[in-house]
Amino acid sequence: MRYFYTSLFYLAIPFILLRLFWRSIKAPAYRLRWRERFALYNKSYAQDVIWFHAVSVGESEALFPLVKQIQKLHPTANVLITTTTPTGSSRVKAVMKESVIHVYLPYDLPDAIGRFMRCFKPKLAIIMETEIWPNLYLACGKRAVPLYIINARLSEKSSRGYQKIPSLIRPVLAQVSLIATQTEDDAKRFISMGADNAQIKTMGNIKFDIKVSQETLEQGMQIKNDLFRGRFVWLIASTHKDEESIFLAAYQEIKKKIPELLLVIVPRHPERFSGVRKLCEQQQLAVVSRTTKEKVRVETDIYLADTLGELKMLYASADIAFVGGSMLPIGGHNILEAAAAGVPVMFGPYMSNFKDIARGVLATNAAVQCKDKETLIDSFLILYSQPLFRATLVENAKAFVINNQGATDKICKILSLAVIK
């Protein structure tokens, strides 16, 4: 089965490259460093690395505290972080700077994986969430590299899909030393697709261990006081295509009742920044962008946050935050950053990627869920008119985050022992 999988992957390479080129039309970073995706390096790197892999921005942000703990415990160790997306790459470089090695994860092709392994000779491999690459995992097993899946989650749909190809998945999972799952349900799904009970420990979600520094909070308040002065700020974070239209329509209705309302939009993907601005302007809305350093005036409707890495600070500048990717069937995004920044949180009906977190905040009265545009408007007006309700949401959300922390420390202890071996 693996040979069939590998053959298909090789046949798909021209289409994968075409997709990279297509994406690079709007996001030029996709056409850069393409050689890394085949593990074709033009320089030498340190070897015997502790290797972490995080797909994109969300996984990288959650991973950083763990990496920093490992670095503190093992200051002489060489640490490698791989990502898949340019935005994830940008966050690694911005946050970790020169303290780690960074390249893109190569495609799951035997020759590329072989070059990657020979170049870095990892002594430990740590994969975030659910990145199961058969050739990569089997290469770790062949080279006796201890392999850990951390913060592992698996949807019911993905589990059913993997169960249909047991001859491929079971040998792959057999290479894993430990699967540290977020929940007991995730553990059961990994077992159902072939993992052994002894491989699995439920250790919680490291995304709860997020910290928003006092400096970041103060920077957010400075933006609120200096740039957004006199405006009631509604921040819409991590929006996707077609979501902005929903919020712009809601904004224009709410604006009639709250003239001082300012809508701050933070698109999920940087290649969409210019398109979102055009959409706002087509609706005759006055837009200013963060990168142009334009002033927010009385007549300004939209503040477009066309930067990367500033979301926590912008959360701290807002009066209410809505976390996007949830008004359309995308699966939602992490609401814990907003909660940790101390802003009342709203989200939409589609939270399949964060189902347990969504269930938890709703059960503890720590956030508001909106099923459609009408509910969105009604909920916002209630929050606006009830400062005490907003304060209650904030306090409950902070307590929810704190009560679920600790996974990073647990995982760090296990990985640290593995480094010593």
Image: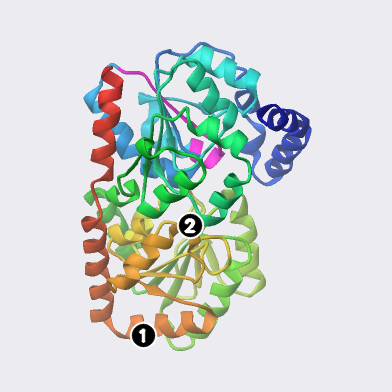
Determine whether 171 is above or below 420 in the image.
below
Find the magenta span and give its range: 77-89
User: Looking at this view, is 184 or 376 the one in front?
Assistant: 184
Quadrant housing residue 356: bottom left
Given contact means CB atoms under 8 Å apart, are the residues at marks 2 and 1 in contact?
Answer: no
Determine whether 154 is above or below 147 in the image.
below
Nearer to us: label 2 or label 1:
2
Asked if residue 84 lies in the magenta stretch, the reply is yes
Asked if residue 232 shows in the view, the reply is: no
Q: Specify whether 201 is left or right of 373.
A: left
Q: Which mark is residue 353?
A: 2
Q: Which mark is residue 241?
A: none
Q: Which mark is residue 382?
A: 1
Name the residue furthest bottom: 257
Percent position (x, y) of residue 278?
65, 63
Asked if residue 349 lies in the magenta stretch, the reply is no
Percent position (x, y) of residue 102?
47, 26
Disc 2 is placed on an element classified as: helix
Quadrant where the C terminus lies?
top left
Q: Residue at x 45, y 43 (%)?
A: 129
Q: Specify whether 385 is left or right of 262.
A: left
Determine whether 92 is above or below 116 in the image.
below
Q: Residue at x 56, y 39 (%)?
A: 85
